[in-house]
Image (cartoon, helix red, strand yellow):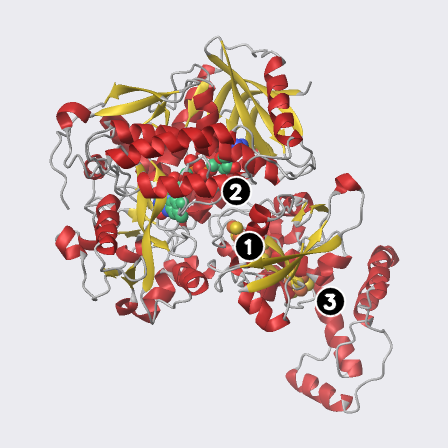
Amino acid sequence: MRIEIQIQRFDPDNGQEPTYESFRLEVPRHITVLDAIIQIKDEQDGSVTFRRSCRSAICGSCAMRINGRSGLACDTLVVDELDRFGEIKVQPLAHMPVLRDLAVDMTPFWNRIESVKPWVEREEGTEPEWPVEKETLMPQSFVDELDDVSRCIMCMACFSACEIAEVDDDFLGPAALAKAYRMVADPRDCETGERLSKLNEHGGYWDCTRCNQCVEACPKDVKPMEAIVSLRREAINSGLTDTVGSRHITEFLNIVRQEGRLNEGRMPLKMKMSQPMELLKIMPMAMKMLAKGKLPMPIHPPIPRVREVRRIMDAKGKGESK
Amino acid sequence: MQWVSHDVLIIGAGLAGMRAALELPAHLDVGVLSKVHPVRSHSGAAQGGINAALREEDSWEDHAFDTVKGSDYLGDQDAIETMCKEAPSDIRQMEQWGVIFSRADDQRIAQRPFGGAGYPRTCYAADRTGHALLHAMYERVLKRNTTVYSEWFLTSVIVEEGQCVGITALNMSTGELFGCRAKAVIMATGGYGRVYLTSSNGLVNTGDGMAAAYRAGAPLMDMEFVQFHPTTLKSNGVLITEGSRGEGGTLINARGDRFMSTYAPNALELASRDVVSRAEQTEINEGRGVDGCVLLDLRHLGRDKIMERLPQIRDLAIKFAGTDPIEVPIPVRPGAHYSMGGIQSNLDGITPVPGLYAAGECSCVSVHGANRLGGNSLLETIVFGRRTGAAAGQFVLDRAMPNPGNHHLDEQHHKIAALMDTNEGDRAGALRQELGTIMNQSVGVFRTQDNLTEAVAQAEVIHTRAQKLWVMDKSRVFNTDLTEALEFQSIVDLARTIAAGALAREECRGAHFREDHPGRDDDNWMKHTIANHSEAGPVLTDHPVTFTRFEPQERTY
Ligand SMILES: Cc1cc2nc3c(=O)[nH]c(=O)nc-3n(C[C@H](O)[C@H](O)[C@H](O)COP(=O)(O)OP(=O)(O)OC[C@H]3O[C@@H](n4cnc5c(N)ncnc54)[C@H](O)[C@@H]3O)c2cc1C
Ligand code: SF4
Ligand code: SF4
Ligand code: FES
């Protein structure tokens, strides 16, 4: 079949702004977006630049935005895109500097991964010295629990889709947090406490808005948002309560009590009221969100039947913050 | 002129390269250089598993026997014994370093049956074993705080007065050429599957390290032995793991016959890979195939088992073949998969060029001989990555930092400038297709003297054309058109050694099958093929095979 693909082109060498270039080509019906782009590079324009290797969704090289959605080009069929969108437009991943065409500079992403110390830290003196006589015993149920997070291929599709990553440069992002959870949940790791308290800070697991974008973008079904929720649960269970996060939960409940629903505009204000410096810190992000039309308005009236909400909350005994 | 220095420089950040890095003592200055980010290395694509005789009922001697037999007696038995003896410890160490292996009921590492093995000794992490190992290894490398040159492309190995003294490389993101002085260089650049048109290998598996070492004077060994995996997808060569047959999958032809019962009545689908690939090719050639393929049937395993044990395989089949194996058999055919040949090296990674080491798929130790058993190559990367790191660490102790001349860098500048300055000639992509087709047809599963003679001649012509490729991309920044041209120059050098070795070896052994010379010929060919570089093409000699305890027998499954 004959198709057209629009590719966003950019070369820092020629000093021009990114522009779309359109390519027409004849392809078999069952072809991936990656194979189509490879065909363009081989047959039409050798300067089209992108990363690729395995072409089987395991090396994580070929993530890009296809019709606006972040995902793997080798895992996306041309026909599916045409059926859904009627066209194929490819761009590099978002929230990272573009190196060239579809390749972004991933350094900031790798730095985030590194910052969560993504290795199993063992108790002093238990480092396995060669020859190693025994493996750790572990039931398959542990393995299953870690199954989702251990599938991550570090493709960065989730980060590119994440709305907080867009506005807050300090946010570690879904993949790094999922990796952190992978370590926290590993019975062989001895730094669970340190990890949880470090990630309790700004940029960590409390900064996610649970928008689910990362879960939808992830080609390996890692479900980063669920890992983030698990980190929060672990944190609270381990007694990390006087923190941004648990204040968040408290304020969440207070606002719902007052207004009968969550007012996302008020949340950050309420939370940071007690700390003027903190409020200043989030201002640049708030401005960015405002500019992108993502800031909810802080003032709106309670819903009509707010009393019923309060009654339900009181009945549940969770209405008051402690 | 830009130079950096390291005590030990490792080229390649797959399992072998990173394992070597971890073995080098902290006081040494170690650099790891890789053309893709470490976790993008092809090791991550390995699905099925890694072998070790972990259980009391199994023994390293049995593992060694299976490996020797699988190698069709061409493997060096001292190296095989070492690998099988050390395997359990290396697996346990990887486990303790963080790899999440699948578990058996007794909470120990689970093991599955694999082709050519007399005991279920393949450890696995679902069907993404390589991925689990590679990421855990990378995490350890981060912990060790090693200098990693990510997306740097090796362009040459520098040898002065017979000693390896460094390398040159291109920093892909800036387009700058660098030299690196090193007291020792470890080559860990993986395999050359991309020499063939249909291959299970990633597009980066172009054998650059082997080719660069070869041009610098290191001998390549047993290059004619290329493993064809019996189950690759028709559309793009993507692999369906042997684990799918280990879990009970069967192969059927167009008539629905389970044809392996005629070729390997005992081992059936789990016979050695060369045996299964030839059986499939025979079925296809004799008209019992389906559209150039045979069928891999998993239906009888049932939904639950497929979902639990082979989830990734199911995804791949749905995505790339448009079939859900729970309901329909998957069309598969043989595809180039593993490079048994490589840089001649011993069981400490030492090559005939002092200062140059090799480990992993780019090396030829040789533990795989004429045919590798599934699950043994991940093992090789870890055992010999470790041993090579240790040996190189020793070697550099009393060695001064060499000081290679600037002309090495000049030469590379000229070579690249020449590629960048032309606007005519062949494009690498088109030539790769041309050569790959020849290799598939004439140097594939079945080989004859006529076909091979023709292939040798054609590869020589393509080699000449490949010296003047047309690089359309003129940018300095991340110029993948340029690196593809350089990769193709590696491919064509290696293709010539493969075809030459295959033409010379007048027998059938393991993966090498000469229709015009049936049967294994131990009297004349129980020896390794050595290829040395010359301007006119590969010059072949040979090298004896090391025997310890296993006498050659006929190989049947
Ligand atoms: C699809 C598939 C499935 C497999 N399944 C199994 C299995 O189940 N069990 C098993 O035992 N084996 C399996 N194998 C084989 C096994 O995966 C490989 O043999 C092994 O991983 C090779 O590891 P390596 O470290 O030698 O090389 P690789 O992991 O390939 O790494 C090579 C490194 O060299 C670098 N490099 C290459 N060229 C250059 C250059 N010019 N400049 C700089 N750097 C360079 C690359 O960037 C990369 O980092 C499988 C292979 C494939 C293709
Ligand atoms: S759920 Fe959280 S981490 Fe995931 S995309 Fe949304 S904000 Fe980002
Ligand atoms: S979590 Fe998913 S999307 Fe994010 S890096 Fe990992 S595999 Fe990619
Ligand atoms: S090419 Fe490896 S993930 Fe797409």
Which one is in front in this view, the residue at disc 3 or the one at disc 1?
1
Do the CB atoms of the residues marked 3 and 2 lie less than 8 Å apart?
A: no
Residue beneath disc 3: A248
Do the CB atoms of the residues marked 3 and 1 lie less than 8 Å apart?
A: no
Q: Image height check: is A131 above or below A167?
A: above
Amino acid type at circle 2 is: Gly
The answer to whether the beta carbon of the residue marked 1 is less than 8 Å from any atom of ligand 4 is yes
Residue beneath disc 1: A34
Residue lying at 66% horizontally and 30% vertically, measured from the top left: B421
Q: Is B390 displayed left or right of A3 in the figure?
A: left
Q: Looking at the rendering, which quadrant does residue B322 occupy?
A: bottom left
Local packing at callout 1 (Cα closer than 10 Å; few below 14, some 14-19, many 20+) is: many
Residue beneath disc 2: B429
Local packing at callout 2 (Cα closer than 10 Å; few below 14, some 14-19, many 20+) is: some
SS class of the residue under badge 1? helix
Amino acid type at circle 1 is: Leu
- Counting from the top left corner in percent of width and height, residue A85 is at 63, 71
- Counting from the top left corner in percent of width and height, residue B313 is at 39, 59
Residue closest to the eye, B113 or B515:
B515
Residue lying at 13% horizontally and 24% vertically, measured from the top left: B523
* C-alpha span from label 2 to label 1: 15 Å
SS class of the residue under badge 3? helix
Task: Answer with mark 3 or mark 1, whichever residue precedes in sequence.
Answer: 1
SS class of the residue under badge 2? helix
The answer to whether the beta carbon of the residue marked 2 is less than 8 Å from any atom of ligand 4 is no
Chain ID, mark 3: A
Which one is in front in this view, the residue at disc 3 or the one at disc 2?
2
Which one is in front in this view, the residue at disc 2 or the one at disc 1?
2
Residue A109 shows up from this direction: yes
Amino acid type at circle 3 is: His
Residue lying at 41% horizontally and 45% vertically, measured from the top left: B197
Q: Image height check: is B86 above or below A105?
A: above
